[in-house]
Amino acid sequence: MALLSFLLMILARFILAFCELIAIQFLFSGLTQIKGYTYGDILLCFSIIQMSFTLAELFGNGFKTFSRIVKGGEFDRMMVRPCSLVLQVIGSRFEVGRTGPLLTALITLVLGIRHSRITWNIMTVWTIVAMVTGGMLLFIGLFILEASFCFFSVEDTSLINVLTYGAKSHGKYPIDIYGKGILRFCTYVIPYTLVQYYPLQFLLGKTDSWYLAFCPLGIIVFLLICYCIWRFGVKHYKSCGS
């Protein structure tokens, strides 16, 4: 029964994740392009974000449930160095059951690459790998940021889901289709464009600016900022009973 339950859980998560791909196909059944982006372009963009978010959930899911640890008082017994605590939280919620969405992300990425118009060379391979890796680090950084808020507030921190699940939902399309205001926010506040919009322009051949392929490296700075906030929270945390 345990094995059957496990397989059904993977199947259910696979189907739920695959529904987003079907939605894009329905959209393009009546359209040929959206602001200059073809079905292949959108599918490639979506598949990269899907893979990034799935990997981030696989490795960083512990930060998403960290508020329960703090509110339940378990954190008082886990007081260790901030760096060690990061590894402890990551290892606490590594779920094999997320192989369903991971399988969907792999299939979607293969389809996205197959339908894309990209010219294959070393730079395009680097760009795809950098976008997926940078996107994973971006979402993990946001998970760390969400967990850090638990040190300063006893209120629900689910508002940051707008920046994680919301980004995953809206990130299936290139950021520039939402307007210049959103493009600026996603560049200077939460740098989604570093792992999605700018390298995508180079990947699709819309610009010859090769240096855009290295934009995902900028996520390292964002991740360090998130870690500094986490470190500050750990050092200044006081339990509700203190």
Image: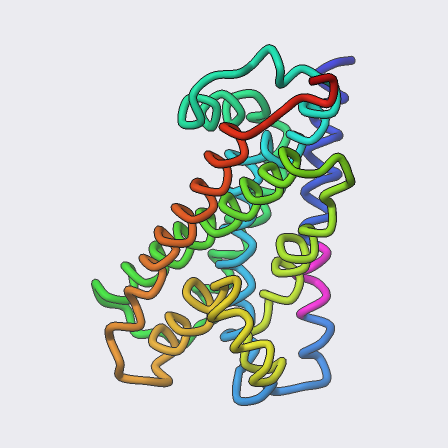
What residue sits 44% from the left and 72% below the top?
Answer: 116
Which quarter of the figure is the C terminus placed in? top right
Q: Nearer the viewer, residue 171 or 51?
A: 171
Which quarter of the figure is the N terminus placed in? top right
- Rendered view: 62 above or below 198: above
Q: Position of residue 180 (x, y in %)?
A: 56, 85
Asked which quadrant contains residue 113, the reply is bottom left
Q: Nearer the viewer, residue 98 or 196?
A: 196
Asked which quadrant contains residue 94, the reply is top right
Q: Position of residue 125 (x, y in %)?
A: 29, 60
Q: Position of residue 52 (x, y in %)?
A: 49, 51
Q: Is residue 28 left or right of residue 79?
A: right
- Rendered view: 17 above or below 199: above
Q: Residue furthest front?
A: 242
Q: Is residue 6 left or right of residue 91?
A: right
Q: How many marks?
A: 0
Any magenta on residue 23? yes
What residue sits 53% from the left and 25% below the top?
Answer: 89
Any magenta on residue 145? no
- Rendered view: 214 above or below 144: below
Colouring method of the image = rainbow
What residue sits 72% from the left and 66% below the top?
Answer: 23
Q: Residue furthest left?
A: 122
What residue sits 34% from the left and 56% below the top?
Answer: 130
Q: Position of residue 107 (x, y in %)?
A: 53, 51
Magenta-drawn stretch, dominant element (helix, strand or loop) = helix
Q: Nearer the viewer, residue 106 or 162?
A: 162
Q: Residue furthest top?
A: 77
- Rendered view: 128 above or below 141: below
The magenta stretch spans which residues?
Answer: 19-24
